[in-house]
Amino acid sequence: METGCTPNFHCHLLLSFSILRRGRRRMKLSKGLQKSGPSPPRAISVAALLVAAVLAFCCLRRLEFSSISYHPSRPSPEVGIWKLRNAQSQTGILCDVTHYRYNICFVNGLTLLDPTSLTFFLLPPHHHSATTSGDGADSTGGNSSAPFTQKLRTYPRKWEHQIMAKITELTVTTGTPRNVTCDVVHDEAALVFSSGGYTGNLYHEFNDGMIPLFVTSRLLAGRSAVLVISEFRRWWGRKYAAVLRHHSRHPPIKLDDLTSTHCFRGGAVVGIVSHGDMTINPALMPNGETMLSFRAFLDESYRAGENRVSELGSESVRPVLVMVVRNGSRSVTNPAEVTALAERIGFLVKIFQPTRNTDLNEAYRVINASHAMMGVHGAGLTHFMFLRPGSVLVQVIPIGTDWVAETCFGRPAREMGLKYVPYQIKA
């Protein structure tokens, strides 16, 4: 297949090198890039940075982005949480409270949620629907005099005690509820998690929320679910409405406002699974799902298949560069110069200045239709997940942030099929 980004990309590169020979244009970064001290901010070569992006972009195959689909690799032998999920089909309640990041419980059988005590009760077999067989207690003690009980908080940052103290504590038990009347009955399972913690920071909203939710939803083995959410915020619900709708056809149950008793014939998964910082481990997934699978899920959530730009890859299109602009620390002080230079090199530049209330539908529309993104390390760069596989991410890395920059954005970008170009600030 022919390579290249536009018919004039050779001219763009020649122009870039010409700019470099005439004298490197500089972009000044704010003092927020400095670790400490009153020394003046360092300058970096924008021309070199943009040339790196153009080179990376143009060395890729022509960007003919077809619909993204799931192509999972063969799953590895059952280990960890996936093995636990399989085992729950034979017993009443199984919990993993040993993991560093999260606690989780699988409840198999008719489950009653009591809104007063915030407890999930596994009801004994005689309360099950007519299709449920068996009349004895399960191994967790469905009719035992010593019922199984586990308390847990459903936010996957278990090691941060101050944050976890703000997350609602829930109980899972085989004990007997005071009231066994179900005000609302769902055929589906409950998938229970918290949208509290660091919500308000986009990086954490994905790292501690959307990615673990995707991972855990795959463990339901194709069963549909009703999302049950504690610390639910209306603005958060609006922000992620498209993703939540794709997870479940039912409106979320807001645990903090709940007054009625809900029963779930499909059981419950209480807690969500995190594989680490901005990652999915295919060896722990039932069908070998990866970060590319999550990107495909986002694509489906935001209906990108209906809005894909048809002229991508045509000879009339200039490569689109989204420049993420920050306020305050770690900000670019001369964005107009940077934009002008990028446009002379051959980019069509779109300035993107995200806030906590940025409409993700609009952000997805803009970024999904672009070819490259550039920005200084920070939460706003999390929008890179809206880039299509094959696009370019340029991260400006402040002094002393090498590890966190690689962990938060470098490795995840490569896992999502992006060409990652780090630009390191040197002391």
Image (tube, helix red, strand yellow):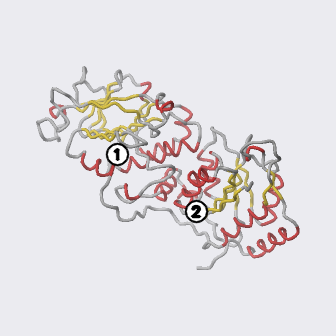
Q: From this viewpoint, which residue is outermost toward the right?
A: 22
Q: Going by the image, does 170 lie left or right of 138?
A: right
Residue 28 vs residue 337, the one in the foreground: 28
Q: Position of residue 275 (x, y in %)?
A: 43, 50
The residue type indicated by label 1 comes to Ser
Q: Residue 377 — which label? A: none
Residue in the image at 43% along x and 42% along y: 101
In the picture, residue 54 is in which quadrant? bottom right
Task: Quadrant for the C terminus, please.
Answer: bottom right
Q: Going by the image, does 208 lie left or right of 74?
A: right
Q: Examine the rendered structure and indicate whether residue 244 appears above or below residue 255.
A: below
Tell me which numbered mark, 1 or 2, is placed earlier along the sequence. 1
Residue 306 vs residue 319, the one in the foreground: 319
Q: Residue 224 — which label? A: 1
Task: Quadrant for the N terminus, please.
Answer: bottom right
CA distance separating discs 1 and 2: 31 Å
Q: Going by the image, does 295 lie left or right of 224?
A: right
Q: Position of residue 361 (x, y in %)?
A: 59, 47
Q: Dot 2: within a 10 Å radius of its alpha carbon, few (fewer than 14), some, or many (20 or more) residues?
A: many
Residue in the image at 70% along x and 51% along y: 399
Q: Examine the rendered structure and indicate whether residue 349 appears above or below residue 267.
A: below
Residue 183 vs residue 204, the one in the foreground: 204
Q: Position of residue 341 (x, y in %)?
A: 82, 61
Q: Position of residue 118 (x, y in %)?
A: 36, 26
Residue in the image at 29% along x and 35% along y: 264
In the picture, residue 230 is in which quadrant? top left
How many marks the image carries: the answer is 2
Q: Residue 418 — which label? A: 2
Q: Secondary structure at mark 1?
A: loop
Residue 197 vs residue 3, the one in the foreground: 197
The residue type indicated by label 2 comes to Leu
Residue in the image at 30% along x and 30% along y: 120
